[in-house]
Image (cartoon, helix red, strand yellow):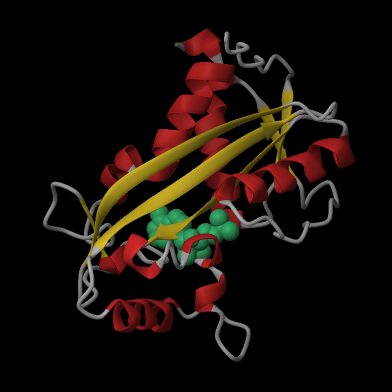
């Protein structure tokens, strides 16, 4: 069976299907070298869809499709999280929701403590996943999954990261993502992996 070639992105403008300001600036910086104008879903007044998927790929696709069909412009979305096989894949697609505190604020110290408590003496292997989905208004989609393998460590170490970075040591390193210089983490992360695949497949001009 022959695999169809990925669709090339040739439009001048792209919607970044996220309402998170950190992600918006990261996407903008990554796309700037390609001369693509970016506009966020929030700026266009597009609603944030419910993340009802049961996989990272489904959630990335539903966010990208909602923005592409709602705006008439291709849209890029991501979905990411930490997967611990010994916890049956948790927190996985619920990584952000695990940190929801009673007052509605995110509390990642609480989420990391809960994860380590539930893991107990079981296998510490873990990986971060990022799925990027580029969707067009006609419904066409291209998806790319990035991954970085490592292990859970305790106690937390480092203050440079976010989310679960302080308990995650990437394979081959004896430091956590939160102890690394951000440039170093960004060069080896699950997001960098997915972005590299996207650029290679859909933005071939700069390869
Ligand atoms: P999303 O915004 O629905 O993709 O949720 C991603 C969640 O996964 C974040 O809130 C973090 O909890 C976790 N996560 C994703 N990537 C990272 C990372 O690079 N470091 C630490 N936590 C991450």
Q: Residue at x 42, y 66 (%)?
A: 163
Q: Quadrant of residue 164?
A: bottom left
The residue positioned farthest toward the front in the image shown: 1
Quadrant of the image for the N terminus?
top right
In this view, 158 is above or below 117: above
Relative placement, left or right, of 54 versus 112 is right
Q: Residue at x 23, y 65 (%)?
A: 124
Asked whether 168 or 94 is in front, the reply is 94
Asked whether 143 or 204 is in front, the reply is 143
Q: Provide residue 34's location: percent of width, then percent of height.
A: 56, 20
Q: Provide residue 48's location: percent of width, then percent of height.
A: 77, 57
Asked whether 126 or 26 is in front, the reply is 126
Q: How many marks?
A: 0
In this view, 38 is above or below 102: above
Q: Provide residue 140's location: percent of width, then percent of height.
A: 76, 26
Q: Provide residue 77's location: percent of width, then percent of height.
A: 64, 43
Relative placement, left or right, of 161 versus 43 is left
Quadrant of the image for the C terminus?
top left
Q: Residue at x 32, y 66 (%)?
A: 86
In this view, 122 is above or below 194: below
In this view, 2 is above or below 22: above
Relative placement, left or right, of 67 versus 153 is right
């Amino acid at each position: 069976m022959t695999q169809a070639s990925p669709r090339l992105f040739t439009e001048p403008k792209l919607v970044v299907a996220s309402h998170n300001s950190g992600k918006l600036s990261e996407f903008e910086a990554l796309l700037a070298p390609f001369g693509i104008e970016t506009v966020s879903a929030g700026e266009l007044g597009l609603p944030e869809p419910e993340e009802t998927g049961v996989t990272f790929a489904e959630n990335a696709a539903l966010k990208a499709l909602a923005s592409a069909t709602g705006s008439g412009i291709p849209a890029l979305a991501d979905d990411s999280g930490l997967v611990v096989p010994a916890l049956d894949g948790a927190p996985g697609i619920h990584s952000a929701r695990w940190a929801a505190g009673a007052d509605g604020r995110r509390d990642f110290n609480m989420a990391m403590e809960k994860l380590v408590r539930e893991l107990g003496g079981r296998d510490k292997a873990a990986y971060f996943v990022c799925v990027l989905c580029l969707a067009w208004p006609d419904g066409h989609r291209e998806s790319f999954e990035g991954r970085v393998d490592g292990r859970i460590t305790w106690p937390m170490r480092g203050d440079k990261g976010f989310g679960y970075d302080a308990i995650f040591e990437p394979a081959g390193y004896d430091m956590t993502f939160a102890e690394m210089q951000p440039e170093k983490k960004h060069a080896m992360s699950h997001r960098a992996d997915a972005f590299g695949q996207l650029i290679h497949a859909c933005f071939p001009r700069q390869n």
